[in-house]
Image (cartoon, rainbow, N blue to C red):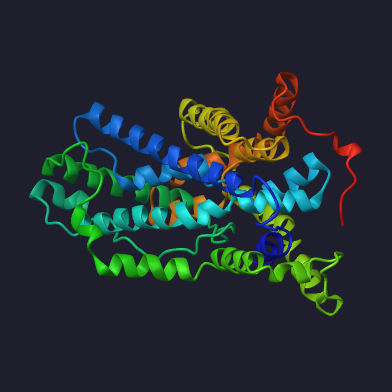
Amino acid sequence: PCLVIKGIGIGIDFYSESNIWAYIVAFLVLRAASLILALGAVLFTNWRDKYRSKGIGHVAVLWLSLTWISTVIMGVPICSAVFGNPNLGRKYGILAGVSSFIFQLPLQLMFLECHATEKQSRLNLPVSDEEDQSSSEVPKLDCTMVTIQETTDHSNTPHGGEDQEQEDVIAASLSTHTHADGIKWWSLVHVEHLSSSELWLKITKRILRNPVLWGIFWGFVLSLSTAGKYLRCPSESCILGLNWIPLTLGWLGATVSPVSLFAMGLWMHGQGTRQLFSVGIFKLSMSMVSKLIIVPLIMVGLAKGLRLSDEAGRAAILIATLPISLASFSLGRQYQVGEKDLAANVAAGTLLMLPTVLVWNIVLDKVGLFPIASPAAVTPSM
């Protein structure tokens, strides 16, 4: 929250800086387009199988795999290095994440809560005699949710394989019930779940407890009220007696990337190579092509269509190539859906991050799209 408040509330002037709103809209449209792609992929799979083999939870997993981008933890240092200016890194990295918390976060929670509710109700259904033995081995679902933010899940245990086997058993049971109940392939969620007041109360509470969302809110309040300009030092409007506020926010915010990256390294080490890459090579390859090539190409079109400046366009495309946040794996683990896929996406995307950014930078330079000055020629503004 400290990094977000300083980056948005103090570092950005929404009234004078051009392209700011268009930049935010670009990522909003990107996430909306990715949601449509995820819905289409799940519906196609169900149509091919002739029944609903995948539900709204799988839509959430695909959507996370495409656009729950690590805009702050990875985006800020990457943009800082590309532009040779930490202030620009904070600006573009933080603004890229705004739509993830005001648009993608509420919908993700709704999808996953509906998935959890339906899973729980189906696990409680009576079964036939021949299914009784296998169904008795299916555990009850723990529907406790995690706080959605760009943080890590520190609950790594040596029982990850057992958890995955448990998830596979549950998935097989749900698939059996779904096929037997004759649910149509196009029906991704039961409508009655959406009318549950308890569902919406859970979602609202979880959103309101999200510290990053509050950081975005207070950042916009500071910037749009113009109060942030009095904390922007050095400047003509700076009140020197209040300079300790941005300094403190900056000091705390500077710990975000190094602490998170260190925690990610511990997570990858604890998971182990076999568990991280337990999905098929073809499936993982298609996920990487979608995340590292197709999603950035969509952003190229959006940047051109919204007429982003060269600097903003370059930042948007490079951030779109970054891996998804480790929080996505935490979600999959918590809701027991797509855990293997999300773990592989986080690990593979992180390993391929540096070469991907370098290649995209070279390609954009070669074709003359959104040219920027060399970092060596840029003097960082303090």
- Residue 321 appears in the picture as rendered: yes
For residue 42, above or below residue 77: above
**Horizontal arrangement in the rendering, residue 323 relative to residue 368 (left or right):** left
Q: Position of residue 17 (x, y in %)?
A: 70, 51
For residue 79, above or below residue 163: above
**25 or 134, nearer to the observer:** 25
**81 or 271, nearer to the observer:** 81
Residue that appears at 50% across and 50% down: 329
The quadrant of the rendering that contains the C terminus is bottom right
Q: Residue furthest top?
A: 367
- Residue 275 appears in the picture as rendered: no
Q: Residue furthest bottom?
A: 241
**104 or 273, nearer to the observer:** 104
Quadrant of the rendered image containing residue 7: bottom right
Residue that appears at 26% across and 69% down: 197
**Horizontal arrangement in the rendering, residue 60 relative to residue 215 (left or right):** left
Q: How many numbered discs sit on the rendered protein?
A: 0
The quadrant of the rendering that contains the N terminus is bottom right
Quadrant of the rendered image containing residue 82: top right
Q: Position of residue 332 (x, y in %)?
A: 44, 51
Residue that appears at 60% across and 38% down: 320
Residue that appears at 24% across and 49% down: 189
Q: Position of residue 49 (x, y in %)?
A: 23, 29
**Horizontal arrangement in the rendering, residue 367 relative to residue 85 (left or right):** left
Q: Position of residue 227 (x, y in %)?
A: 70, 71
**Horizontal arrangement in the rendering, residue 318 relative to residue 200 (left or right):** right
